[in-house]
Amino acid sequence: MKKRKRGTAANPFSAWTRFAVTTGEMMAASAQVISHRTARMAAAGPVPDARDRTEFQLMGQEKLEAVAESAQAVTMRIIAANQQMAAIAFDQLLGRTARVMALTTSQTMAQASRHQAALVKDVLNTSVKAAEHLSRVTPQIAQHGLKPIHSRATGNAKRLQKVKITKKK
């Protein structure tokens, strides 16, 4: 019997829980940043100073950068997951060929029944392997896609917490 991996990578529930916690952190940080920047825009008035203009420009730029990094991270993880799934499918194809040949060359009904049962058992076992792989990599892909956005949001929340909003005269 194969030994199962331990830890969050092997446990989809733990991986999805970690993703939910990270998403919650990002949402809380985003709310802080939005609140700060909205207040800052209101305080800046129709003619913001250089410091405010820099911050307002940063808002758009950082979103584009975070989305690009996120898309790249997700793409790279999906490519790797697809390669792993292809390897699983190829293994299934090669591994079941002998079982199919044995089934097709069966000379009695009892022999055919045994070969068919063995084939079905193998197919089900390898299908479980593919399903386990998908349930393991899907939250990892999501976590890697969230990471750049999370780091920007939490970083901005920490940075902007130190900035005092002053109303322009």
Image (cartoon, rainbow, N blue to C red):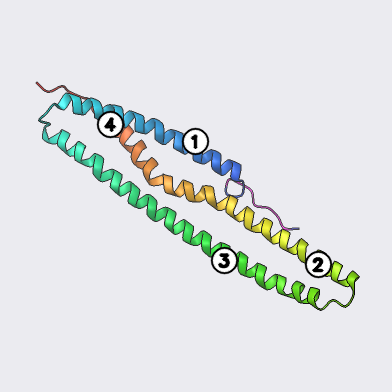
Return the residue at label 1: 21
Of 157 and 80, nearer the camera is: 80
Neighbourhood count class around disc 1 (C-alpha, 10 Å): few under 14, some 14–19, many 20 upward: few
**Mark 2 or 3: the one toward you:** 2
Left-right relation of 11 to 167: right
Image height of 122 relative to 150, above or below: below
Image height of 75 relative to 154, above or below: below
Quarter of the picture holding the C terminus: top left
**Mark 4 or 2: the one toward you:** 2
**Amino acid type, label 4:** Leu
Return the residue at label 3: 86
* Residue 77 seen: yes
Return the residue at label 4: 160
Image label count: 4
Image marks 4 and 1: residues in contact by CB distance under 8 Å: no
Question: Tag 1 or tag 4, which sits nearer the N-term?
Answer: 1
Return the residue at label 2: 116
- Image x and y of residue 90, in percent: 61, 70
Question: Tag 2 or tag 1, which sits nearer the N-term?
Answer: 1
Residue depicted at x 24% and y 42%? 60
- Image x and y of residue 125, in percent: 72, 59
Residue depicted at x 25% and y 39%? 59
What segment is highlighted magenta in the picture? 2-8
Q: Give the CA distance from mark 1 to mark 2.
A: 46 Å
Residue depicted at x 77% and y 61%? 121
